Amino acid sequence: MAAPAAYLVTGIPGAGKTTVARLLAQRFPRAVHVESDRLQEMVVSGGLWPTPEMPAEAARQLELRARNAAMLASNYAAAGFVAVVDDVVVSPGRLALYREHLTARPLALVVLAPATEVTLHRDEHRG
C-alpha cells in the first residue's frame, strides 16, 4: 500500500488536532499543514463561526471552509507535498465533502479521541 498523499486529522475541539497535524507534517521532507480555522479567519467581515444553534449562513461558511481546505490540500498534494488538513468533521456529510474535494489518494483519516479530562484541560489552557 502506498503512503498517504493526504491526511485529514479530526476530533472534537481541544483534542489536539492542530498540534498533531503540524507534528505529522514535520515528519515528511515536503509537507503542508492546512488549518481550517485559519481559512475561517481569512473572512474579514460577515464571517460566522459555528455555534450550537448553527444559523444557515454559518453552516454555509463551514461547508465553504471545508471545501476550500480540501481543494488547497489537493493542490499541494498534486505538486508533490504530503497534505495534512485539520478540521472538526462533524457528520458523514462533511466527511463526504472532504472525500469529494480532497482528491489526493490515498487519503488517511486520523481521528483523535482523548479522554474528557484531557480535552477539558487543553481547552482551559489554550488561547
Image (spheres, grey):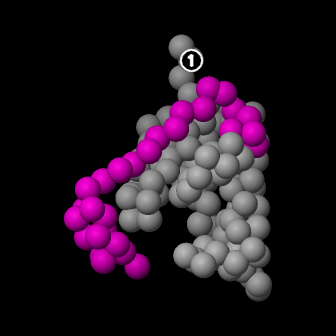
Considering every residue shown, the one lying at the far top of the view is 1
For the N terminus, the image quarter is top right
According to the picture, the residue beneath numbered tag 1 turns out to be 2
Residue lying at 22% horizontally and 65% vertically, measured from the top left? 117
Q: Position of residue 69 (x, y in %)?
A: 69, 53
Q: Callout 1, which amino acid?
A: Ala
Residue lying at 30% horizontally and 77% vertically, measured from the top left? 124
Q: Position of residue 11 (x, y in %)?
A: 45, 54
Secondary structure of residue under mark 1: loop
Q: Does residue 126 appear to the left or right of 109 in the view shown?
A: left
Q: Does residue 42 appear to the left or right of 115 in the view shown?
A: right
Considering every residue shown, the one lying at the far front of the view is 53
Mark 1 burial class by Cα count in 10 Å: few <14, some 14-19, many 20+ = few
Question: Does the stretch in magenta take in 102?
Answer: yes
Residue lying at 26% horizontally and 56% vertically, measured from the top left? 115
| Location of residue 98 by image quarter | top right
**Position above or below: 21 against 63:** above
Which residue range is magenta in the image? 98-127
Considering every residue shown, the one lying at the far bottom of the view is 45
| Location of residue 41 by image quarter | bottom right
Question: Does the stretch in magenta take in 101?
Answer: yes
Q: Is residue 86 among what the camera can see? A: yes
Residue lying at 55% horizontally and 76% vertically, measured from the top left? 52
Q: Does residue 35 appear to the left or right of 26 in the view shown?
A: right
* Towards the viewer: 60 or 7: 60
Q: Position of residue 57 (x, y in %)?
A: 76, 75
* Towards the viewer: 51 or 84: 51
For the C terminus, the image quarter is bottom left
